[in-house]
Image (cartoon, rainbow, N blue to C red):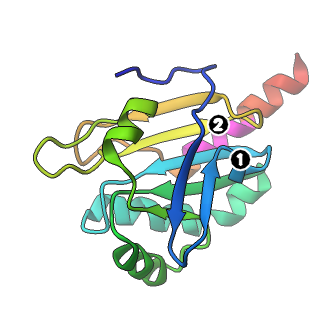
Amino acid sequence: MTLLAPGDPFPTLTFDRAGGDRFTVPDVLGGAFGVVLVYRGSWCPYCNAQLRAFQRATTALDEVGAKVVALSVDDEPTTAALIAKHRLTFPVGHSADASAVAAATGAFVDPDGGYLQSTGFVLDPTGRVVVSVYSSGAIGRLVPEDVAGLIRYVRDHAASS
C-alpha cells in the first residue's frame, strides 16, 4: 500500500452515485481545487458530522473555488438516505470497493468491518495531491475551515511566486 503524498497525481477512480449515474475523480472536479472525503459509513457519527460540516461550508468552499466529493462502501439505499438526511449537494459515491480504493489511495481498511477508514485529500486544479489525511480509526479527518484556509494559502502563495 502506498500513501499519496503532496505532488502525487490522484488516481482516476470511478464511483456509482445514488440515482444511477457515475462520476470519476478527479474529472468530476472540473479543474477546480478538490476535496475527496472517504468516510467510514452512514453509521459513523464522526463521518456524519464531517459531511454536514462540508455541506454547511459550501459558500466558503465556493469562494476559494473548491468542489467536494465523498464516497464509502455503503450501498445505494443507505447512501441515498444519508444524502437526503443531510441534504448533501456534492457527489457521494456508494458501494466503493474497499480493497481497490485502498490499493489506489493508501486508505486503511477496517479488518473486521471491511469498510474504509476516514481519509481525506485536497487536490489542486491539475488533480495533484496538496495534502492527504489518513486515519486508522474513527477520528482524524479534514475539516472545511482548514481546507478553505489551505486553498487560500496555496492560491496566494502561487500568485506571489
Badge 1 or badge 2: first in the primary sequence: 1
Vertical position of residue 46 compared to residue 158: above or below: below
Q: Residue furthest top?
A: 161
Residue, x 60% and y 38% (percent of image)? 12
Q: Position of residue 121 (x, y in %)?
A: 53, 38
Task: Name the residue type under label 1.
Answer: Asp
Left or right of 96, for residue 30: right
- State whether the magenta stretch is mostly helix, strand or loop: helix
Vertical position of residue 12 compared to residue 58: above or below: above
Chain part drawn in magenta: 146-152
Q: Position of residue 38 (x, y in %)?
A: 42, 49
Q: Position of residue 64 (x, y in %)?
A: 76, 49
Residue at numbered disc 1: 27
> Along the line of sight, which residue is nearer the eye, 147 or 87?
87
Which mark is nearer the camera, 1 or 2?
1
Q: Which mark is residue 4?
A: none
Q: Which mark is residue 123?
A: 2
> Along the line of sight, which residue is nearer the eye, 38 or 64?
38
Q: Position of residue 124 (x, y in %)?
A: 71, 34
What SS does tag 1 mark?
helix
Task: Name the residue type under label 2.
Answer: Leu
Distance, label 1 to label 2, CA atoms, is 11 Å
In which quadrant is the C terminus drawn? Answer: top right
Residue 9 figure quarter: top right
Vertical position of residue 157 compared to residue 17: above or below: above
Residue, x 33% and y 65% (percent of image)? 74
